[in-house]
Amino acid sequence: MSEGAREWLVPDGFLPEESSGSQESHEAICVLNTSGEEARLRISFYFEEREPIKDVEVVVPPERTRHIRTESLGGAEIPRGVPYAMRVESSVPIVVQCSRMDTTQAALSLMTTMAYPVER
Amino acid sequence: MSEGAREWLVPDGFLPEESSGSQESHEAICVLNTSGEEARLRISFYFEEREPIKDVEVVVPPERTRHIRTESLGGAEIPRGVPYAMRVESSVPIVVQCSRMDTTQAALSLMTTMAYPVER
Amino acid sequence: MSEGAREWLVPDGFLPEESSGSQESHEAICVLNTSGEEARLRISFYFEEREPIKDVEVVVPPERTRHIRTESLGGAEIPRGVPYAMRVESSVPIVVQCSRMDTTQAALSLMTTMAYPVER
Amino acid sequence: MSEGAREWLVPDGFLPEESSGSQESHEAICVLNTSGEEARLRISFYFEEREPIKDVEVVVPPERTRHIRTESLGGAEIPRGVPYAMRVESSVPIVVQCSRMDTTQAALSLMTTMAYPVER
């Protein structure tokens, strides 16, 4: 069974600097691995005015989801308050969705989109 | 007439634990069946740290939509406050969109995305 | 020049019954016609427990966008407070995105998604 | 390496007239260029009742993202408070996502979607 794609791109990444209320502003790369094998991910981050951070490693076990928060990725320090973008590569086909919670002002907002699957 | 796909995936599922105001926090799998036949769905739920719940059955009549709330699915008890993901399989081609309302704080937020159609 | 598809589907339609503040709760079918020809649309609405409303006619001029609010479509009375879904068919290829503003509680929320292009 | 598409369309553009709190209402065309070459963009804007504004030029360097706010594009004056739509053409394959922040009322809302890739 092969469900999804091995590479996904997300142009709109942003970690708000502020939060209010009970929920912290954050962004999550949500991955679904429906296969029977471990998915070994390499995640790269692109910026407007600096070199990319490449190949941060994350593992998603077989038949599991992981909602990976970008502010706490070991091996990558994503700055808050600046635009970034993401590439997710995987050893097996997966599906990737990216969501942001912004609580800068006193009421949360959410946004989400399926990532863009690269055909290859 | 065959419109849509027989299998759809959604990586970002989450049922907020709290609600405020007149609207309850919830998530809905929205299905459109434009065909002249009944769509027999099997919905599976994936988690981060437990085995999947597989093949919950739902029916969508011909030329009808159903907005299926995930907290009240007979045969599946989706826990609130933990990440999950969804797979929807159907006996006929359908289209699937997934939307969340989060009213944890005192003002609602909505997010939505078309699900990912698996090519097969 | 042929940009987009001739048929699009959106499973999650909903017109909130209430509004607050300066902005009315509404939903819009946003169409872009980049061609040099008029796009003659036929829009159908599907429900959970009643027959569809089919083939409401709308025109989008060449090289124009139209953001069509679903509560004010001549020829269709979409009830508020019940789930519905949409099909958009066009005489020329177009692109369709669907967005909702919900101001039931005292702070607006927005959601949007590209519609699903049917391959035919 | 060729990732994405050379042309993208977004039907739902709108710059809210008002803002509140610390965050200004705005819309951003978010571009990711993972290639080793400069991406030379031409962005066109479509309206409901006037001629399009065509071919505004923007550059995205190799291995960079740019989150292009539509209210401050040199060469284009996008009016606030009216519907518009966007076409993005690029000299190399890119990925485009479009996001809006609306702070008309006293609590922000966000929405986002991947743009529609034209196959050609």
Image: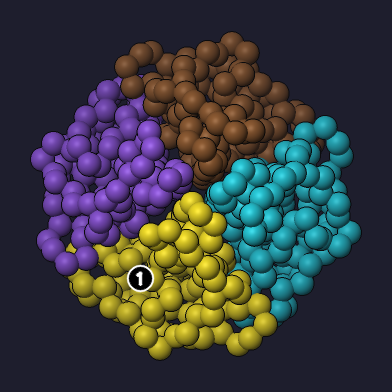
Chain colours: A cyan, B yellow, C purple, D brown
Q: Residue at x 33, y 22 (%)?
A: D48
Mark 1 surroundings: few (<14), some (14-19) or many (≥20) residues within 10 A: some
The answer to which of B3 and A9 lies nearer the viewer is: A9
Q: Position of residue C60 (x, y in %)?
A: 27, 28
Q: Is residue D1 visible?
A: no
The answer to which of D67 and A62 lies nearer the viewer is: D67
Q: Residue at x 30, y 62 (%)?
A: B32
Q: Residue at x 59, y 58 (%)?
A: A97
The answer to which of B20 and B80 lies nearer the viewer is: B20
Rendered position, B69 above or below A47: below
Q: Position of residue A41 (x, y in %)?
A: 76, 65
Q: Position of residue C42 (x, y in %)?
A: 19, 41
Q: Which residue is mark 1?
A: B68
Q: Position of residue A111 (x, y in %)?
A: 55, 50
Residue C30: image quadrant is top left
Q: Is residue B48 visible?
A: yes
Total marks placed: 1
Dot 1: chain letter? B
Residue C22: image quadrant is top left
The answer to which of B21 and D75 lies nearer the viewer is: B21
**Residue furthest top in the image:** D75
Q: Amino acid at mark 1?
A: Ile
Q: Residue at x 56, y 64 (%)?
A: B12
Disc 1, SS: strand
